[in-house]
Image (spheres, helix red, strand yellow):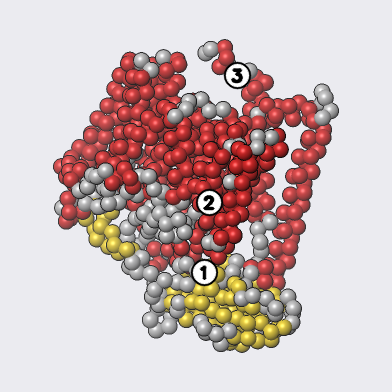
Amino acid sequence: RPAEAVTLPSERAARRIAYLAVAILAVWVWLLLRWLAPGGGLLGRYAIHLEGGAEIPVHERIDPDLDFPVPQRIDAAYIYHWDLSRFGIPVTMPPMVVRWSGLLQVPEEGRYGFAIEATGETTLLIDGVAVPLATDALAELTLRAGLHPLEVDYRLSQGEAKLILRWRPPGGDLRPIPASHLAVDRAAIESDRRRHAAGWSLLAGGILAALGLVLAGRRAGGPAARLVERLAAERPRLALGAILILAALLRFDDYALVPFHHETADEYQHAWEGWNLLHHTQPAAWSTFPDRYPVLQTRDFRWFGDRYVLVWPYFDHPPLFSILVGLVNSLAAASSPPLPAGAPDYLWCSLPVMRLVPIVLSLLGTILLVRLARAYGASERAALLAALVYATLPLIVLSHRLVKAESLLALLFMGAILLARRHERTQAPRDAALAGILCGLSLWTKATGVAVPATVLVLMLRARRARGAALAMLVTAGFLALYLVYAWALDFNIFLKVIEAQSTTKWVSLDALQDLLGGKVVVKWFGRGWYLWLLLAAGVAALKQARSLLVPLAIYGVLIALTADQRVIYGWYRIPIYPFLCVAAGLYLEEMIREADLYTVFPFAVTAVATGLLYALPAGLAQTQAAVACFALCALAPFLLHLALERRATLWLARAATWALVGIFLLTNLTTIRGMLEIYAATRGVR
């Protein structure tokens, strides 16, 4: 190895200390979130209501409040906790009955009003007495201060579940009852107090430990000083570790609810294919082309109201990503009770389990992204800024929850390019062969994975590495041959029919290129301003030092336009190009922070910052002239002033405004993700 590439023992020790520090930080944050989480709530018992009045319990959980403006949170109790061994396959959403019970904590004696907004039938009991509720009226009663038994009975035979129980305290506004005023029982109240006390103690202990380490580190020559010195040398790794922790927190927040269940049935497609391949040695999943299969090789059924036509052997997509998803679901279902004879075991695949795969892949991708940015010439700060955008942008966070093969393809794409770039420097055949392996695995992941070997071929030939390119393509061809053998072993005739169907049902048009310019998660337009800024950053990078970023973007974009159905350009098609767009975004942010001028800040403000404000602010505030005026005051006035009067004071003001806009961008990202269930349900276009 070259001398500059050798890692010294002291450097290895510093890295181990940095990794240990990140692990401790991750555990500390996790415990803080658990122990300082708001307490309160009611015990919800979710059951099926049968004809004749019988009720069968399905699930129990503690709901922090009774604020369900969209059906996903109530439906999840049934969809994700359905016992197939007891209830069989649910053809439709069952008639549901939910009972919440607990205590209402009244802060002061007075007249309290209660109102309900719900589909179905709702009954409210306080102190065992029924409170007459109406959707267009306020029921008032006098309550003394203290704890009052509370019960809510909710029934829905059909339609979308919706329930919002509001109250109006004396002198207050009508709003949902806060979790702080609800409790399962008195023991839960005391348990919450102890938990919060432990959380605050842990927070104080962590802060004191950090301060103590910093103060002790000022004593030259001591162990603490050496530790601080090593940690300071590993600041980029520590920063990346913190970004990874933040990325994980954002991706796991309500990850099973948003995107919505069955917003795309493709998520189950991958899980079922992998499950059946692992358990029954034959891929089987629902297909877009069931008419290409013999009737005896299909199964038509309904599940929670949605129709699926299962086919075998399944060839709509290559199996590599599906095998990963099937493996994770198999491990999760290992302790599940056996199913009745003839029941489809692949229905054990659960969305909360299968979505773990793309989330973990996206976290690994964040690490690769930093290396990719450095390979394109980005500084450490620009690479970390790219990772921060990748970790926090809501459009990307939601996409990384989808169980789609593009999540794996993004990693393979980055890895293959990194190996190709390394081969340019080392000329080592091993690097070219490894790049070929990743190219071949891309073909086993998704048909559009052909963009990976195409990009690697262009990069290697451009670098005058013809032998390496030939070796990489030879290895790729071997993987393609293995895939054809896989198809031949199952049923090559059906394979050809599916390939023919996929190629003849496309409606290729230049409109597809235009559609690629808009942001989506699945088919719903979401975060178009964020996506527009990413494209703008890529354009700016192409005009400067990172123009080679456009190679994978151009190849993949044109391939999607040629192969995707123009009428259905899905949002997940963009997942493999998000890393390259974020590298460009990191370069853009670094230059913007350095220059702090109108020409770089204003495009960022009117796209990325404005989009975040639209989602994070209440609609009544965001859609006002005052909001626009405040935005102009922060995003325009300081930079116009510095442009007109180039003084040290105006430069300081412009830099302060630049950092404020970056902070607003990150803060609105976090706020949007925290309230994503309601925001996404109400989204139509930008708002």
Q: Secondary structure at mark 3?
A: loop
Q: Nearer the viewer, residue 69 or 78?
A: 69
Q: Is residue 401 visible?
A: no
Q: Is residue 83 left or right of residue 445?
A: right
Q: Secondary structure at mark 1?
A: strand
Counting residues from the N terminus, which is met first, the one under dot 1 or under dot 3?
3
Q: Nearer the viewer, residue 11 or 468?
A: 468
State the residue lying farthest toward the front: 644
Label 2 belongs to which residue?
610
Distance, label 2 to label 1, CA atoms, is: 28 Å
Amino acid under label 3? Thr
x and y percent of residue 29 in the render? 65, 47
Identified at 68% across, 41% down, the residue is: 653
Q: Nearer the viewer, residue 590 or 266?
A: 590
Q: Nearer the viewer, residue 449 or 484?
A: 449
Label 3 belongs to which residue?
7
Q: Secondary structure at mark 2?
A: helix
Distance, label 3 to label 2, CA atoms, is: 45 Å
Q: Nearer the viewer, mark 1 or mark 3?
A: 1
- For residue 430, above or below residue 653: above
Distance, label 1 to label 3, CA atoms, is: 55 Å
Identified at 59% across, 33% down, the residue is: 595
Q: Nearer the viewer, mark 2 or mark 1?
A: 2
x and y percent of residue 348 in the render? 39, 56
Amino acid under label 2? Ala
Label 1 belongs to which residue?
68
Q: Nearer the viewer, mark 3 or mark 2?
A: 2
Q: Are marks 1 and 3 in contact (CB under 8 Å)?
A: no
